[in-house]
Image: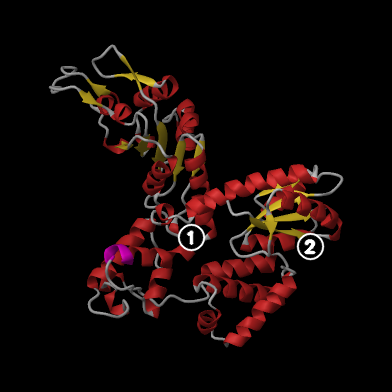
Amino acid sequence: MPQTLWMHPLDPASAGAAGALHAALASSGLVLEDAAPGSFGIVLCSGADDTSLATLAVLAERATVLAIDCARTPLPPDAMWRVLAAGATDLLAWTTAALCAQQVAARLARWSAVQELMASSAVRGWLVGDSPAWRTLVHSVVEVAAFTRSPVLITGETGTGKDLIAQLIHQLAGAPGELTVLDCTTLSPELAGSELFGHERGAFTGAVNARDGAFAQADGGILFLDEVGELPLPMQAQLLRVIQERKYKRVGSNTWQPSRFRLVCATNRDLEAEIANGTFRADLYYRIAAWRCRPPPLRERPGDILPLVEHFLRQLDPDGPSRALDAAVRDYLLTREYKGNVRDLRQTVARLWHRHTGPGPITIGDVPPDERPARVPCWPDAPFCTAIRHAVDRGVSLARIGQAATDMAIRLVLEQEDDNNQRAAQRLGVTDRALQIRRKAARDADGVP
């Protein structure tokens, strides 16, 4: 575990606690350093006023933040929720410096382990993206996969990567068994029992040999039921019994067979609505949904479109040079509607790639004629206008809107260019020196160390 972290008192009243905690952390072998992007830090506060929360929000954009309430009177519940809404991952109440240091060390150890897994090729090769929504999802998937044995229910639209999440859970779970995949949409009423339970020889017409079902194949591993919402009610009841009793009988057999597996299910249906309609059992739902995740549709993570494009291009030509996109193609991919989400984007990239010939970037002529936009996409677009309207409705001044837009553009471009000031300045249309001055002014204004 990295033994480094940083600490930042949000107000003068918490400075004394900061000194005591500093000493307790040092005695535990934890070294305090300066805040850095992607790091882990502690903020101490004696309240949840607007100034403290604003500073916390700025810090939380750059790092993972654990908050400690140092006030004599604990924060009321609504204020505690505001601290989390500002970006803190957790809020601890001050007890003693030694106990707080132990709590910090435990959370740092878990955070470090999760971050190491998230940075591994096993994760980044499967789940591609760096948008906040996507990173939050991947963090949760990694944590539940590696540190629990809970059943997982993956919900969401088609093409959002539900099957990839199931495969990643299998990789990280450390289970010695296989990942057994069963597509519930392919189960016919006549053969569903055999597919799940297996059958004995002669159990029914055509059963010339005994056969293992999904429960036997998944023993010691993970059973992935894709589109579990398609299971008919009788099969739902039988699945529930196996989950509860950890054993089953083959079709045509009177012998109970044990099976211990971790259950992962996926569906694009709204199972809570299905329960209300009487088409899905509530007791089964609560058995399979011990932990739930929803991979966001691509429209909710537009910042991941270009990284996904690069990923798909590398898959299409793993031994070839990296392919750039000309400006029109980038704009086309960023503004196109993807009704099939990531799967739709992958197919779009494949069509561009197969039309492309020769060296150099993928150009506008590689876009198939029937897919070219009927009109040139405009900017500012609807999402930008919606954000500005929301700010105006909240009474934000014109100067603050402009400054926030500038700061956000700088931060996003620096992230995309790996903090290279020169390349970021070129993309933003300013000089290298001007961008350095803007970055220093933003840090000074935020009071961020």
The answer for how far apart the CA atoms under marks 1 and 2 are is 29 Å
The residue beneath circle 2 is 51
The amino acid marked with disc number 2 is Thr
Q: Residue 172, located in which quarter of the rendered image? A: top left
Residue in the picture at 70% in, 48% down: 28
Residue in the picture at 27% in, 71% down: 320
Vertical comparison of 305 with 13: above or below:
below
Q: Residue 315 in magenta?
A: yes
Residue in the picture at 39% in, 30% down: 261
Q: Is residue 183 left or right of residue 336?
A: left
- Which secondary structure type mostly characterizes the magenta part of the structure? helix
Query: Which span of residues is magenta-colored?
Result: 313-318
The amino acid marked with disc number 1 is Arg
User: In terms of depth relative to the viewer, which is nearer, 226 or 438?
Assistant: 438
In the rendered image, residue 324, in percent from the top left (x then y), is placed at 36, 76
The residue beneath circle 1 is 301
Determine whether the residue tagged by mark 2 lies in a helix, strand or loop: helix
Q: Residue 213, located in which quarter of the rendered image? A: top left
User: In terms of depth relative to the viewer, which is nearer, 287 or 98?
Assistant: 98
Vertical comparison of 250 with 388: above or below:
above
Residue in the picture at 47% in, 42% down: 145
* Disc 2: CA contacts within 10 A as few (<14), some (14-19) or many (>=20): few
Give the farthest residue toward the top: 254
Vertical comparison of 446 with 167: above or below:
below
